[in-house]
């Protein structure tokens, strides 16, 4: 008989999916120094939750800063600064990962989305 772990049970309830992207370092001596994001892992099951939403007054424009939390399996590796492309109910969110907190049953990452309006 196979016993499911708590992480497996939590993962089975997650309906959102995520692609983890990381900046590929520029090659030393290369003429093109533009940093590019490369996919590290795709199809990661997760849960996206809104933490806060705010509108900051800029100079002549507004900047919207949305803070989200992502919950996923504890063995998933997400580094601070990674770009996370999350799909939730047909909508796509492009977020920048903060520092991840690893628990026994899940990984929790606070992320930020910044947009000029």
Image (cartoon, rainbow, N blue to C red):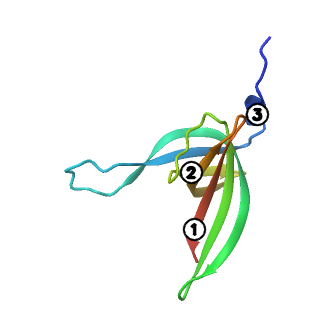
> Distance from label 1 to label 2 (Cα)?
13 Å
Q: Is residue 110 left or right of residue 42?
A: right
Q: Is residue 88 left or right of residue 57?
A: right
Q: Secondary structure at mark 2?
A: strand
Quadrant (top left, top right, bottom left, bottom right) of the N terminus: top right
Question: Which residue is depicted at the point 78% across and 30% down?
Answer: 6
- Whole-percent x, y for residue 104 in the image: 70, 34
The residue tagged 1 is 114
The correct choice, above or below, for 111 with respect to 18 in the image is below
The correct choice, above or below, for 52 with respect to 10 in the image is below
- Whole-percent x, y for residue 95 in the image: 58, 57
Please tell me which of labels 1 and 2 falls first in the chain: 2
- Whole-percent x, y for residue 21 in the image: 49, 47
Q: Secondary structure at mark 1?
A: strand
Question: Which quadrant holds residue 65?
Answer: bottom right
Quadrant (top left, top right, bottom left, bottom right) of the C terminus: bottom right
The residue tagged 2 is 84
The correct choice, above or below, for 49 with respect to 18 in the image is below
Please tell me which of labels 2 and 3 falls first in the chain: 3
Residues 91 and 46: in front is: 46
The residue tagged 3 is 12
């Amino acid at each position: 008989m196979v016993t499911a772990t708590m992480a497996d049970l939590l993962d089975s309830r997650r309906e959102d999916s995520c692609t983890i992207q990381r900046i590929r370092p520029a090659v030393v001596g290369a003429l093109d120094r533009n940093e590019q994001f490369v996919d590290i892992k795709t199809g990661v099951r997760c849960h996206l939750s809104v933490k806060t939403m705010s509108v900051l007054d800029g100079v002549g424009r507004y900047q919207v800063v949305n803070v989200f939390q992502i919950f996923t399996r504890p063995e998933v590796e997400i580094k601070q600064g990674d770009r996370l492309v999350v799909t939730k109910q047909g909508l796509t969110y492009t977020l920048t990962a903060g520092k991840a907190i690893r628990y026994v049953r899940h990984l929790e990452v606070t992320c930020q989305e910044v947009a000029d309006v």
